[in-house]
Image (cartoon, rainbow, N blue to C red):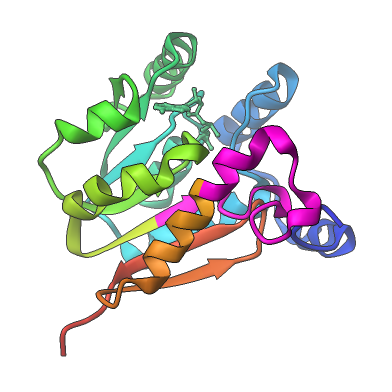
Amino acid sequence: MNGITYDYMEDYIRGLLPENSGVLNELRSFAEKKNVPIVQKETARFLELMVSIQKPRKILELGTAIGYSAILMSEALNNKVDITSIERDTNMIAEAEKNFAKYGFDNINILQGDALEVLENLNEKYDLIFMDAGKGHYNHFLPNCLRLLSEEGIIIADNVLFRGMVANNDLLKRRKITIVKRMRKYLEEVNADSDLITSVIPMGDGIAVTRRRLKL
Ligand SMILES: C[S@@+](CC[C@H](N)C(=O)[O-])C[C@H]1O[C@@H](n2cnc3c(N)ncnc32)[C@H](O)[C@@H]1O
């Protein structure tokens, strides 16, 4: 068990996935070598699928790292999408910008800074928001993400079960208590809000997909 699912299940599902194409393969190898956290393989596939169903024209990402998930989403849409990605670490930004330039992704732009502050200053609408930064702040990001979400947009939040700690106190490490409490708050809020519909999926590190309920 990895806290979320059985190892044999994860291995089996990962074994079904074909290797990524050139650029994504290179970036995943780089991330593994340099210990940069990027979306897990099955989460990457899920993201690719959601993007191809949703067909967003504008995506907002929280947490660029080296640009892996941004490139994955862009490629899934034949690059017919504008992606804005927020990142606070300048070394990551330099690496991601190098990758975007090297592989010609001029449709992906990085906003430098803490997502909490950057979000405050955004005013455009996004058809898909991918939350993958600052696990201890998802509940704080939520009001602005909902403000920025287009009417039929979706929010995909990664790491919501955080190695199982969010669901099971026996797994909880003392130094992670604040993050876990806030993540629970996020999940409680998106589930309790009658205007929203959310599904929590025990895949990878836990994924929550949220959208507004249809007004029929
Ligand atoms: C898990 S990584 C993102 C991985 C990326 N989405 C991918 O799968 O390729 C999280 C990134 O978020 C950044 N980060 C963490 N907290 C942040 C915050 N409050 N504001 C902006 N960036 C943050 C970290 O520097 C890190 O690069």
Task: Report whether 154 appears left or right of 136.
Answer: left
Where residue 62 sits, quadrant-wise, is top left
Residue at the outermost bottom position? 216
Where residue 32 sits, quadrant-wise, is top right
Task: Report whether 183 appears left or right of 173.
Answer: left
Quadrant where the C terminus is found in the figure: bottom left
Judging depth in this view, the residue of 28 and 180 nearest the camera is 180
The boundaries of the magenta stretch are: 156-181
53 to 174, vertically: above or below:
below
Where residue 192 sits, quadrant-wise, is bottom left
Task: Report whether 39 appears left or right of 60.
Answer: right
**Residue at (31%, 31%) from the top-left corner?**
116
Judging depth in this view, the residue of 35 and 186 nearest the camera is 186
- Place of residue 104 in the rendered image (x, y in percent of width and height, measured from the top left): 36, 24
**Residue at (65%, 31%) from the top-left corner?**
28
- Place of residue 54 in the rendered image (x, y in percent of width and height, measured from the top left): 33, 64
Residue 46 in sight here: yes
Task: Report whether 108 appears left or right of 204.
Answer: left
- Place of residue 37 in the rendered image (x, y in percent of width and height, measured from the top left): 62, 30
85 to 148, vertically: above or below:
above
Magenta stretch encompasses residue 157: yes
- Place of residue 41 in the rendered image (x, y in percent of width and height, measured from the top left): 66, 48
Total labels: the figure holds: 0
Quadrant where the N terminus is found in the figure: bottom right
**Residue at (39%, 16%) from the top-left corner?**
97
119 to 204, vertically: above or below:
above
**Residue at (39%, 48%) from the top-left corner?**
139
Magenta stretch encompasses residue 148: no
Residue at the outermost left position? 123
Judging depth in this view, the residue of 12 and 149 nearest the camera is 149
Residue 158 in sight here: no
